Image (cartoon, rainbow, N blue to C red):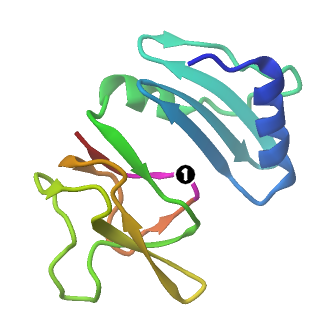
Amino acid sequence: MNFDLEYIEKLVKMVSDSELTELTLEEKESAIVIRKEKEVVQAQTIVPQTIAAPVSAPVAQSAPVQAVEEKKEDTPKGTAITSPMVGTFYMASSPGAKPFVEVGSTVSTGQVVCIIEAMKLMNEIEAEVSGKVTQICVKDGEAVEYGQVLMYVE
């Protein structure tokens, strides 16, 4: 992944000026995580086995980014399915119903894998790739943010 400093600075400004608390961009096995904590925006590039220092000059580091260590230890396999919006994650169409997918389920492109409730609307989230669900990263009924990884499909 090769992002230029100007692009990263624009992302940091976007997070800083918005109500977002975190923005994650992933490509293959690399990611950029921009996290806002107490009005401080942090930007960090994550590359397997290599951890870069914060990339934006005006960024103050108030707390270490724990996601870096978690990602290094528990590298998930497959393609990430991320949340396209802020809302509440549901694994099934209604309470007590069978979940759309479980770890080990085979999914095909366009298949509904979960629901994100946003502003009283139920939004069906579809798989962008075909494969086997290797990990579900969110619990049923949990709040999710834009770009947050919901599950991985290999």
Q: Is residue 116 above or below residue 60?
A: below
Q: Nearer the viewer, residue 69 or 135?
A: 135
Look at label 1 and name its amino acid. Gly
Q: Nearer the viewer, residue 106 or 42?
A: 106
Quadrant of residue 139 in the image?
bottom left
Q: Is residue 77 above or below residue 113?
A: above
Mark 1 highlights which residue? Answer: 147
Q: Is residue 22 above or below residue 26?
A: below
Expressed as whole percent of the image width and height from the top left, the position of residue 63 reads 66, 33
Question: Taking the image as drawn, is residue 60 in sight?
Answer: no
Expressed as whole percent of the image width and height from the top left, the position of residue 91 reads 28, 72
36 sits to left or right of 116: right
Span highlighted in magenta in the image: 146-150
Residue 37 on the magenta segment: no
Expressed as whole percent of the image width and height from the top left, the position of residue 65 reads 58, 32
Question: Taking the image as drawn, is residue 120 in sight?
Answer: yes
Q: How many marks?
A: 1
Expressed as whole percent of the image width and height from the top left, the position of residue 10 reads 83, 35
Q: The C terminus lies in which quarter of the figure?
A: top left
What residue sits 71% from the left and 56% below the top? Answer: 20
SS class, disc 1 = loop
Q: The N terminus lies in which quarter of the figure?
A: top right
What residue sits 16% from the left and 61% below the top? Answer: 102
What residue sits 79% from the left and 37% below the top? Answer: 12
118 sits to left or right of 6: left
What residue sits 39% from the left and 51% below the top? Answer: 81
